[in-house]
Every structure is written in structure tokens, then in C-alpha cells.
Amino acid sequence: MRAARLPLATVTAVGLVLALGTLSPAQAGDGSWHGAGDNSDTPKSSKGSPADSGGDSDPGSIGAHIRINQSKLASSSSSTTSTSSNINWKPPVCWYEPMYTPDEYEDFIKSSYKGAQEPAANYAKKRADEDYHKGDKGLWWQVQFRNDDYTEACPVTTDNWEIWVPPAQPKADPNQLTPEILSELAYNSTKLPKPPVVLNPSPDRLKVNLGTRVKFEGDFDRVWTTASINYKGVEMAATTVATPVALRVDAGTSDADPQTCTYDLVKGDNGYTVDSKDAACNVTYLHSSGTGTYPFKASITWKVTWTDSADPDGPARQPGLPDGLSTYEQNVTVKEIQAVNR
């Protein structure tokens, strides 16, 4: 998505109401911006920034000027989009981003709303009556959307497609971009490695009444994702850090004892590891899978924290984010152990 994606002149009143909706405002932390008139939209590198913390594996963008950078995953890892352990958690649908100086905003309104019908014409007149805040210090911030399909309601009203934000703002709009909103966008953009699970015996050779040993193969470490903006003097960032804490395996059938096991992950020299060889819990299948298979599932729980900078080692901020989950499923074949009678 890019700047000035849907001028009001091109959208009907009904379409605007459907797109913007009446959802309750997103929760936002205390954000601030510095200066005005800096036209740079390139995030600055700082200690702990993506440029200094192992590079990017999944760079991208959200909205108009928000940049997403994620730490590199192990070369042997396949990845999956992180899911929240809290089914009720939702990322922000929309937010305000800095977009225009007063002169730029005047040009935008006059070019985009030329010959517009109602309600867009009235909206353009409202901004003209405000003289676009020309001569004032500050910027016009415009609503931006996380998705282009507009299937979720945005809490911004059609009367405020853009808002004026002065340098000293007594009370920020609840939907104005903040480090907390950036942290939620970073969380929603995070890709996590699938559990690098290795089974012993191998998945096609599991045996009835024989415990299944689970271990990891390859490097496996924490993952961080930074969402940042540096545009026209508005500079802020937030970094989410996902640390693996536990592995849960599910036998894929009730004919196992136990059906599930959970293991704490241990930090080793090359990242986090698990080896269930001497664990008190190991899945043991009680019946063969016959001519079919069982869907063995492994899920990692990730403790997620965030900090209001591009430094993944910065102090954790509140409110917290829900745990993340990454899951891998494979079919396993369980056979009876054949005994030889003499």
C-alpha cells in the first residue's frame, strides 16, 4: 500500500462507510515525533538496528512509509507466519501516518478532489476553509490500512481521512501511529521457523509400545522484527523479540500414551535445543497406524516482548504482546514390532 491510495473523490459515501466502519479505536501508547521538514524516508541505522543485528530475512513495508525488517532465520529453517496464542488478539486495521506538509496537502486536495461529488466535495471545502494549516508548523497525517481489501472496519471516521498534527500535541488521536502500534504491526509481520523436529525412530518407522524420542536439528534461536518510520522528521520504531520457550508435540491420535508431551527449551551454544531422551514424557503409540498414518504435530511457544526502538536488546515495554506459535505437522507410520517364535 502506498500514499494517497484512495482519494475521497474516487469513493462513494456508502463505500467510505463500509471501508472505515465504526470499530472501537485501537489501543495506542505514548508516541512522539521530532521536527518537521525532513523529507528523508530512509530509516536511519543505529546500534542494534537491522543493519547491525544480523541483516534482514524478510524486509518489506506496510502502509505508506513503515518499513519492516526481520532478523535472519537459520539457513536450514523453513518458516511460517506467527500465530497468536490469544485467539482474540487482532493487529491494527488502520492508523494515521505522517504524509504531507501544508503546501503538499493543498496540492493533494486540489488535484484529487477536482470536480468531486458529495460527500467528497464538502470534505475538500472543509480543508480549504482551514487553509490547509499553511504557515503552521506540523504535518497532515493520513489514514493507512494494513490490508487493501477493507474487509475489517476501521475506527477512523469519514470526516477525518487526514488529521493535522502540530509538533506540540496536547492529546494525540487514539489512532495516531505510536511505537505500540508499530510493535503490533511488527508482531503481525513476524515469520517464525517451523520446529526442526527429528524423530527417533524415523517418522516412517515408529513402533507400537516404543517411546518416540524428539530432538532438534540445526541452529535455532530467537527472532526479532522491527517496524520503523522515518519520514518528514517523524521518526519512531518498535522491535518485537520472539524467544522460544517450549515445544509441544501431539501424537495425532488418542491411541497414544500420553497423547501430548511438552518440553522446556534449553539455551545451548548454537541456540535453543530439546532432546527428550531422558525426559519423563515421551509419546508412545499403543496401536499401529495400519495402512494409513497419524498426523504428528509439533508446536513451539514463543515468548514475545517489544521495545520502543530498533534495538532488539532494549528494555521491554508494556502492554505486553501474546505468545506466538509456530507449528509443523508430518505424517508418521506406526508398525507393530514383529516377534520371531522359535
Image (cartoon, rainbow, N blue to C red):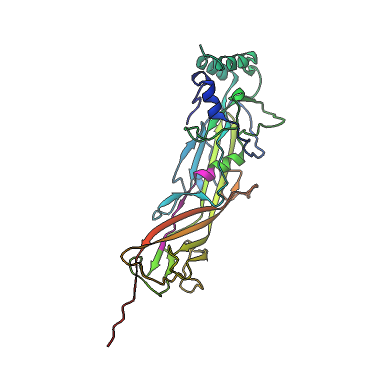
> With 317 as the anchor, is 110 left or right in this view?
left
Give the x, y percent position of residue 44.
Answer: 54, 37
Q: Residue furthest left?
A: 342
120 w.r.t. 215: above or below: above
Q: Between 287 and 56, which is closer to the camera in this rendering? A: 287
Q: Residue 190 in magenta?
A: yes
Which residue shows up at 31% across the image and 81% down it? 339
325 w.r.t. 136: above or below: below
Give the x, y percent position of residue 64.
Answer: 51, 31
277 w.r.t. 216: above or below: below
Q: Residue 199 in magenta?
A: no
Give the x, y percent position of residue 22.
Answer: 60, 31
Q: Quarter holding the C terminus?
A: bottom left
Q: Residue furthest top?
A: 115
Q: Between 240 and 6, which is closer to the camera in this rendering? A: 6
Which residue shows up at 69% across the image and 29% down it? 169
> With 190 as the anchor, is 29 left or right in this view?
right
Residue 138 in sight: yes
Which residue shows up at 46% across the image and 39% down it? 60
Q: Between 133 and 278, which is closer to the camera in this rendering? A: 278
Q: Residue furthest bottom?
A: 342
Give the x, y percent position of residue 237.
Answer: 58, 40
Magenta stretch bounds = 186-197
The image quarter in which residue 105 lies: top right
